[in-house]
Image (spheres, grey):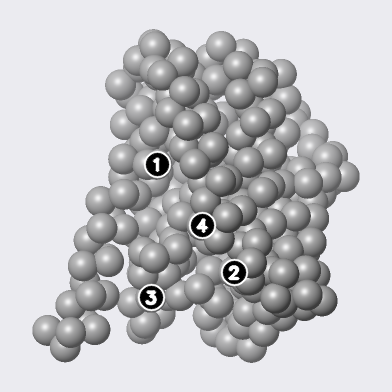
Amino acid sequence: MTLLLICLAWTVRLMIFALGLRTTAADVMYLWKRPGLLLRSVLAMYVGVPLVAVVMVKTLDLPRTTQIALLVLAICAGAPLVPRKLAGSGGAPAYVLSLAVTSSLLAIVTVPLSVALLDWLFNARAEVDPLAVGRVVAISFLIPFLLGVAVHALAPSVARRLVTPVTNVAAAVFLVCAIVMLVLTVALIIENGARSFLALSALTVASLGIGHLLGGPRLEDRVSLAVLCATRHIGLVIVVGFARPSRAAVAVLSAYIVAALLVSTPYLAWQRARLAALDRGV
């Protein structure tokens, strides 16, 4: 399992590097030139989703590990693979890239502050090192992404030649690793129980709804923000809530990944069909 996780981590970095190979500075700054969309995005990701998680934990009878997972997932925005996930699915590319970079940077500040607020609300004693958060963000997203952007800026012809093979190889390896990991953890997901799985699914549904409602008038932006709200940064989740992963922790995180996939996939298919209909003028 350890070797599999290492392989997944490096594959993700390679995919982010490939993303940077086709990204410009204008893409990164897209959101900052649209303050209304930026404000709605921040409210959705850092206020709306955590509020839903708090209400769920306060009102539902759930295992403690699942309660912790719901709260930590809710505050760990900035998933590095969201741009890849939305590629070809109707998301606005520049908006997705800009918000992915912005949320990754904001996580360095928002995650420790959110943990402090949750400590106060639930009388807990969790401590998060901002340096640890920053290290995860840098390793998983910023460094490989900025390396790709640098290659694009300094040697655009090289970037054009590299982007397709690097993307294809990374995507193929990632798919194989993900399937193997799912097979290895399916028993743990079942062991974790239906209540936990339904709660994690409900958080994903609510996150999609919040992002879709606050995304603004353009359907592309609604789809992008919905998926960005519903996809969390697993690396940060482990640092914040499961620094010493137990069997129960692995089970609940695996259940979240499967639940998010099962909920997000039909949503993306539905919105892709709607966007295609709009393009045809239907």
Could you say whether the residue bearing mark 2 is in a helix, strand or loop?
helix
Q: Are marks 4 and 3 in contact (CB under 8 Å)?
A: no
Which residue is drawn at the image coordinates 82% and 76% (left, top)?
Answer: 154
95 up-or-down from 21: above or below? below
The answer to which of marks 1 and 2 sits earlier in the sequence is 2
Label 3: which residue? Answer: 220
Q: Quadrant of the N terminus?
A: top right
Residue 260 circle label = 1
- Residue type marked 3: Glu
Which residue is drawn at the image coordinates 53% and 14% (left, top)?
Answer: 248
Q: Are marks 1 and 2 in contact (CB under 8 Å)?
A: no
The mark closer to the camera, 1 or 2, is 2
- The Cα–Cα distance between marks 4 and 1, rounded to whole angstroms, is 15 Å
Q: Is residue 115 left or right of residue 63?
A: right
155 up-or-down from 253: above or below? below
Q: Are marks 3 and 1 in contact (CB under 8 Å)?
A: no
Give the x, y percent position of residue 41.
Answer: 53, 70
- The Cα–Cα distance between marks 4 and 3, rounded to whole angstroms, is 15 Å
The answer to which of marks 2 and 3 sits earlier in the sequence is 2
The answer to which of marks 2 and 4 sits earlier in the sequence is 4
Q: Is residue 140 left or right of residue 253?
A: right
- Residue type marked 4: Arg
- The Cα–Cα distance between marks 1 and 2, rounded to whole angstroms, is 21 Å
Label 4: which residue? Answer: 84
Label 2: which residue? Answer: 97
Foreground residue among 197 and 140? 140
The answer to which of marks 4 and 1 sits earlier in the sequence is 4
- The Cα–Cα distance between marks 2 and 3, rounded to whole angstroms, is 13 Å
205 up-or-down from 268: above or below? above
Which residue is drawn at the image coordinates 68% and 47% (left, top)?
Answer: 13
**Residue 279: which quarter of the image?**
bottom left
